[in-house]
Amino acid sequence: MGLNDRVIALREKRLKKNGVAVPDKLQGVTKEKIEEVLVKLDLGDKKDMVDAVFALIDNETENLYTTAPEGAKFCEGASTARVACHIGILQRGQGKIDREGRDHWIKPLRELGAIEAITLYEGQFIPGHLPKNPNCCYRLESEFVSILKAPDGQWQRMLSEWFKRDAIRGRRQFQAEAAELARESVENGHSDLIAASRDIYSKRFLPGYHVIYIDDGDGDRISEKERETLGEAGIDITLEDAMPDVLLWNPDTDWLWVIEAVTSDGEVDNHKVNQVQRLANRCGKAGVGFTTAYLTWKEAASRQGPHGNIAVGTYIWIQADPAKQLLVESYQ
């Protein structure tokens, strides 16, 4: 009997005996809990991934390798084909899902260290994938399982510690936090991008800088409070000065930083650089840096495709891909 037929038979047997093919909880973990944890990794919107983790935590189903150790359970090692059968047949009552989708529901978690590679070799599961071995498979990393099983209030702390030990996981955490801020925002468009530039971008990429001015388009161009803050930074604004969407100052280095949030136009082009550089020179600042912020890669491409106007030596930041920034450099 082939793999698909064995899983179909198992499902029918369970339905006849228990009325359900898969319980709501495995090792005390629900799919809802898995999704809640994956959201913190910015991975919670992928149904197949949630179901893959649920399959890999299954300690009730017998292992589907006929040569697995006696009494071994599914969670101890499963190939992508076996996970695909668990998801499609056992959990959903349909056909095996396309195992080529593993790049979407195995690879991201493997890159984070939540899933580890193993091989069934001579009746035992051993670490790593052996070259050209047909029994290469996967299992959940033990610490990640502990996070999934931990109670509310505890798993969040455990996940935070897990994040800190890996740079890729740290970037995922940052992306998840950025996504959450975006979801919580009650504004849209330009105002939302300005807020993201202040609350997300500057806090990650501009340590030591303080916001001294924000152009939100409401009321007076510069409020009395902003004039006071600008004065403390040694900035004297005149009518000829072009003020950016966000202006920051680092008191330790006496550098300024400009962020332009672009939803229609207004990138940091050479004209903008020259204008702000004159302001910085007149006020005796040590230097000034620049960033153009876009909401999405698509919007960045739609602007830069026809215009290509961002000044060399400045940066680009994309709110939808917040864990990195790009430096614009020139061949000459």
Image (spheres, rainbow, N blue to C red):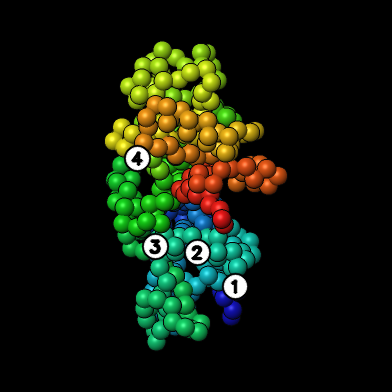
Tag 4's secondary structure?
loop
> Which is nearer the N-term, disc 3 or disc 1?
1
15 left or right of 58 in image: right
**Mark 3 crowd level (few <14, some 14–19, many ≥20, 10 Å Cα):** some
User: How far apart are the alpha carbons under marks 4 and 3?
Assistant: 29 Å
Q: Earlier in the sequence, mark 4 or mark 2?
A: 2
* Left or right, 76 with reference to 64: left
The residue carrying mark 1 is 4
Image height check: is 122 above or below 280?
Answer: below
Amino acid at the residue labelled 4: Pro
Q: Which residue is mark 3?
A: 113
CA distance separating discs 2 and 3: 10 Å
Given this view, does label 2 or label 1 mark the residue nearer the observer? 2
x then y, percent, for residue 177: 43, 41
Query: Which residue does the image show at 63% across and 61% down from the upper left?
Result: 94
Q: Which quadrant would residue 104 be assigned to in this image?
A: bottom right
Quadrant in which the C terminus appears: bottom right
| Residue shown at 60% from the left, 74% from the top | 5
Crowd tier of the residue under label 2, counting other residues whose Cα lies within 10 Å: few below 14, some 14–19, many 20 or above: some
For the point 56% across and 43% down, the residue is 311
Residue type at mark 1? Asn
Circle 4 is placed at which residue position?
Answer: 207
Q: Position of residue 278 (x, y in %)?
A: 48, 30
